[in-house]
């Protein structure tokens, strides 16, 4: 089974990078001819995507897309240091999203067959 790691740095609604990363993750999970394991790591301002109940005006919901990817067995981790730097450590996060360290990301990079950054 191929392991694809997707790393995102941009805020969930500041650009379409996280939106497109999640579109790719969901599509990769739907591929029948080639089994794939998808992992998503959120850094910098992308970590705010794990905060529930955001109501964007753009017409798409990052929370809903994250929940779909998680239901498809995508493992989602976010940088604890990035959360701490933004004063967000005590907030609730979307179910299935896991706080992680740079060491966790390093381990994923080492075992991934492909790493894609947004």
Image (cartoon, rainbow, N blue to C red):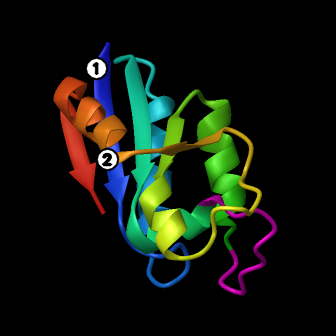
Q: Quadrant of residue 56?
A: bottom right
Judged left or right of residue 63, residue 85 is: left
Q: Secondary structure at mark 2?
A: helix
Q: Residue at x 49, y 85 (%)?
A: 14
Q: Residue at x 52, y 66 (%)?
A: 84
Q: Quadrant of residue 58?
A: bottom right
Q: Secondary structure at mark 1?
A: strand
Label 2, on which residue? 102
Residue 30, how many percent across, how many down? 51, 31
Give how far apart the Cα atoms at labels 2 and 1 are. 22 Å
In the displayed structure, 64 sits above or below 10; it is above
The range drawn in magenta is 50-59
**Type of secondary structure dominating the magenta stretch:** loop
Q: Nearer the viewer, residue 47 or 86?
A: 86
> Disc number at residue 2?
1
> Disc number at residue 103?
none
Residue 39, how many percent across, how many down? 42, 36
Judged left or right of residue 26, residue 28 is: left
In the displayed structure, 58 sits above or below 49; it is below
Q: Nearer the viewer, mark 2 or mark 1?
A: 2
Q: Residue at x 47, y 73 (%)?
A: 85
């Amino acid at each position: 089974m191929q392991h694809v790691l997707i790393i995102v740095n941009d805020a969930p609604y500041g650009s379409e990078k996280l939106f497109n990363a999640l579109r790719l993750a969901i599509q990769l999970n739907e591929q029948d001819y080639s089994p794939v394991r998808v992992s998503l790591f959120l850094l910098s301002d992308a970590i705010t995507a794990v905060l529930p109940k955001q109501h964007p005006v753009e017409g798409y919901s990052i929370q809903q897309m994250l929940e779909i990817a998680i239901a498809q067995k995508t493992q989602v981790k976010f940088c604890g240091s990035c959360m701490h730097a933004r004063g967000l450590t005590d907030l609730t996060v979307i179910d299935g999203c896991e706080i992680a360290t740079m060491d966790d990301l390093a381990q994923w990079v080492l075992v991934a067959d492909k790493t894609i950054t947004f």
